[in-house]
Image (tube, grey):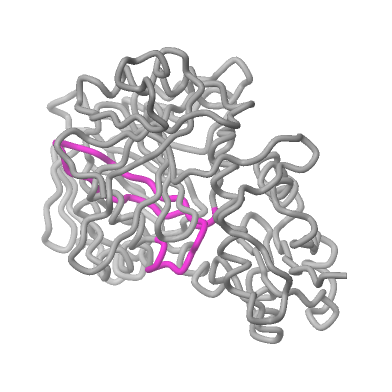
Amino acid sequence: MVKRIRVGIAAMAKKANSKPMKQIVRRFEPSVFEFIYFGDERLLNEPIEEWPLVDYLIAWHSGGYPLDKVIEYVNLRHPLVINDVSMQKDLLDRRRIYQILREHNISTPRHIILNDSERINNPNIIIENEDYIEIKGIRFNKPVVEKPIDAEDHNIYIYYPLSAGGGSKRLFRKIGDKSSQFYPEINEVRKEGSYIYEEFIETQGVDVKVYTVGPNYGHAEARKSPVIDGKVNRNADGSETRYPVILSSEEKIFANKVCIAFKQGVCGFDILRVHGKSYVCDVNGWSFVKTSTKYFDDCAQLLSEIIWTSVRHKGFGKFSAVAPLTIHGGGGSLREHAGSGGGSGSFCSGSGTTPPTKFNHLTGSNKLLTRESFKGKEELEVDIDEQATNEIDAEVEAATYDHLDGNKQLFLKPAGHRVD
């Protein structure tokens, strides 16, 4: 019998058994990969010496997670990991997140850190005015964003200038269909605790979330910003409304750098876009796209390749990283492709290079297949300029993904860019 790769999943049960995780795991080849779920009881109560031995470990922090204990296990058994567990401590502190971003030349909003100890020792370290605040002699015109240094604390406040009516808005984790609340009478910053104060960036009401799977792949989605009115837009199935977006060359480089800098192969981070410039304002660590079948396909394929390539020297059986994986329990096979013209794509980045801007997408869209330029060809190459983006996105969305065997490939690229 061929030896299988033992992949440990050391995450809280609610996360390990989430719908996205199940969708991804079921796409792995069971004759090659064996998944070992640690479970809450083992993680919380059993000594690490009794935990299973695995070849590869998938572990990520969430509420109630024994991160220090998992770090001890990794140091004891030395499994290979997709997300460095020690670095996950840095993701719990927004000060460290911004520091690491700056160290790797990743653009962040203009900001300053105010620790509680500094405020106690110098009560005048912060000066508040109707239209600005001044911290350590540095002035920030309102609106100003106030973020707790604890990355698990999502109570973020925005203070508005009196010239625009004043007041403040409080952002919080979604409660039902609400994600923020405006308080017209509250204008003063919080007096206790440590915070990051940063310049408010006007994004025209849109937030962008990027999901990496390894340093050369990113899936991007946009949603309505909670700053707008605090109302969460939802689809018919109850999930938050999001739509795929194409990453700029700069944002692809950010994705590559974030993945490497934080040593998190599977990683989510937030981007603010304004006037053609992008800023990273948060890094979340392990994050999945919630409802994209295409992302599940890509993620399973890439993780399979990463894991097998990492452990193949240990004498495991042969596994083709080129052939599509089988979707077990559902029939069919994964699409072989690098990404799509919507929110996902493969890209690579090196010193002094610009990530390729080619995306390919298997399509069953009759509208695309009947184009004159597609007749007699296995591939169709389409230039995307700003005007054509919506049309192409709509056609890609219209494609049928359930039965793609034999479908032709659509290559999307920004107009004027060379496809390598």
Q: Is residue 271 magenta?
A: yes
Can you name the residue that lies furthest to the front here? 376
Is residue 105 at least partly visible in the picture? yes
Task: Give me the residue at 18% from left, 58% from top.
Answer: 135
Q: Is residue 83 above or below residue 373?
A: below
Q: Quadrant of residue 357?
A: top left
Furthest residue to the bottom? Answer: 76
Q: Is residue 104 above or below residue 267?
A: below
SS assignment for the magenta stretch, majority: strand
Residue that protrudes farthest toward the right in the picture: 1
- Residue 54 screen position, x and y as percent: 75, 74
Q: Position of residue 119 (x, y in %)?
A: 30, 64
87 left or right of 354 in image: right
Query: At 41% from the left edge and 60% from the top edge, which residue is drawn?
Result: 215
Considering depth in this image, is 285 or 167 the residue closer to the camera?
A: 285
The percent coordinates of residue 150 (x first, y second) are 46, 58
Q: Kindly indicate the quadrant of the structure image that contains residue 386.
A: top left
Which is nearer the eye, 15 or 24?
24
Residue 324 screen position, x and y as percent: 61, 47
Above or below, 366 relative to 139: above
Residue 202 relative to residue 3: left or right: left
Q: Give me the residue at 20% from left, 46% from top.
A: 199
Q: Residue at x 34, y 58 (%)?
A: 348
Q: Is residue 348 left or right of residue 213?
A: left
Looking at this view, is 407 or 112 the one in front?
Answer: 407
Magenta region, residue range: 259-286
How many marks are shown on the rendered structure?
0
Q: Is residue 389 above or below residue 122?
A: above
